[in-house]
Amino acid sequence: MKAKAIFGIVGMLLMAGFLGSIMIKIKSISLTIVVLIGLVMMAVDFWQSLKERED
């Protein structure tokens, strides 16, 4: 369970850093909105996967 959480957090940070660098370079409002929605969806999925029972 701890490894799942650690790898999930590392993955989320890497994805946020990658998309953040693209957002900074392009500076488009619509791109920023889409990226933020995607990051929120990723965070919710991560939280739900930690809450579910492991088999």
Image (cartoon, rainbow, N blue to C red):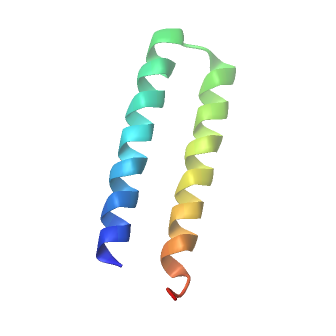
Q: In this view, does 40 lie above or below 29?
A: below
Image quarter for residue 32?
top right
Q: Is residue 31 above or below residue 41?
A: above
Image quarter for residue 16?
top left
Image-based side of 32 in relation to 15, left or right = right
Tell me residue 20's x, y (percent): 44, 28
Tell me residue 33's x, y (percent): 65, 31
Residue sticking out furthest to the top: 26
Q: Which residue is drawn at 36% across and 68% down?
A: 5
Image quarter for residue 35?
top right
- Between 13 and 27, the one lying in front of the other is 13
Q: In this view, does 40 lie above or below 25?
A: below
Residue sticking out furthest to the front: 55
Q: Which residue is drawn at 36% across and 79% down?
A: 1
Q: Which residue is drawn at 69% across and 22% down?
A: 30
User: Number of labelled discs?
Assistant: 0
Tell me residue 25's x, y (percent): 46, 11
Q: Residue at x 37, y 40 (%)?
A: 14
